């Protein structure tokens, strides 16, 4: 446990022992709570050490992230069409590392796409495609649900005359 935390807890116990006010019970309960939390953390670290056969330092520290990427790994994650951050998490690298790798190798990323500001719209969205065709978006969705057809088929049916 951190020596500073131990010092604070010891001081709190000394104050509680000298005091006869109702706060004494509260301080004792707080000290017990801290001790139980520390014991839980230590028990999980001990389990991890015994399970994985690592040292205490390895169990406490988090594993470092990879520094290099391979093209086949990046392309396999790119097929999932995730955002850069989620893809970087899957590849166990920083998002900036993945971003620079994509730019360096001129990869076309099919991820989530551009984030549009308030008032801007994505012209490739289904709603905007329906509006451009002169049909209500809800009409197209209703046709899809009733007839079990794709969006493009419902859109090709045209508007009501």
Image (tube, grey):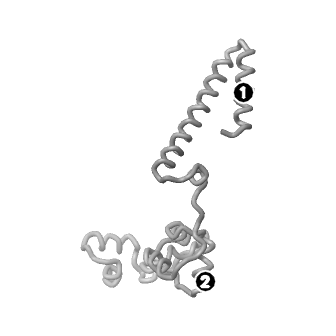
Disc number lying in front (1 or 2): 1
Q: Residue at x 58, y 49 (%)?
A: 56
* 58 left or right, relative to 20: left
Residue 146 visible in image: yes
- Residue 48, image x and y in percent? 49, 49
Q: Disc 1 on helix, strand or loop? A: helix
* 2 left or right, relative to 114: right
Between 96 and 130, the one lying in front of the other is 96
Q: Give the mark nearest the N terminus, 1 or 2.
A: 1
Residue 128 visible in image: no
- Checking the image for residue 26, the label placed there is none
Between 66 and 27, the one lying in front of the other is 66
Q: Quadrant of the N terminus?
A: top right
* 13 left or right, relative to 43: right
Q: Residue at x 57, y 51 (%)?
A: 55
Q: Disc 2 on helix, strand or loop? A: helix
Marks 1 and 2: CB-CB under 8 Å? no
- Residue 6, image x and y in percent? 70, 33
State which quadrant residue 37 falls in.
Answer: top right
State which quadrant residue 126 falls in.
Answer: bottom left
Name the residue carrying label 1.
10
Between 71 and 85, the one lying in front of the other is 71
Are there few (<14), some (14-19), or many (20+) residues within 10 Å of tag 1? few
Name the residue carrying label 2.
103
Q: Above or below — where is 84 with respect to 40?
A: below
- Residue 132, image x and y in percent? 46, 82
Q: Above or below — where is 1 with respect to 141?
A: above
Q: Above or below — where is 82 with respect to 70?
A: above
Q: Residue at x 58, y 56 (%)?
A: 62
Q: Give the Cα separation between the discs numbered 1 and 2.
A: 56 Å
């Amino acid at each position: 446990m951190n020596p500073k935390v131990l010092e604070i807890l010891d001081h709190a116990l000394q104050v509680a022992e000298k005091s006869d006010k109702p706060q004494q019970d509260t301080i004792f309960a707080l000290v017990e709570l801290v001790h139980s939390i520390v014991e839980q953390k230590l028990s999980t670290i001990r389990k991890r050490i015994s399970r994985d056969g690592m040292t205490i330092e390895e169990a406490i520290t988090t594993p470092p992230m990879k520094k290099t990427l391979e093209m086949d790994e990046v392309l396999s994650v790119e097929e999932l069409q995730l955002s850069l951050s989620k893809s970087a998490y899957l590849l166990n690298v920083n998002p900036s590392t993945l971003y620079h790798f994509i730019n360096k190798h001129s990869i076309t990323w099919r991820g989530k796409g551009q984030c549009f500001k308030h008032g801007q719209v994505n012209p490739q969205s289904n709603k905007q495609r329906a509006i451009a065709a002169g049909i209500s978006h809800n009409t197209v969705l209703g046709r899809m649900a009733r007839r079990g057809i794709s969006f493009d088929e419902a859109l090709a049916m045209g508007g009501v005359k």
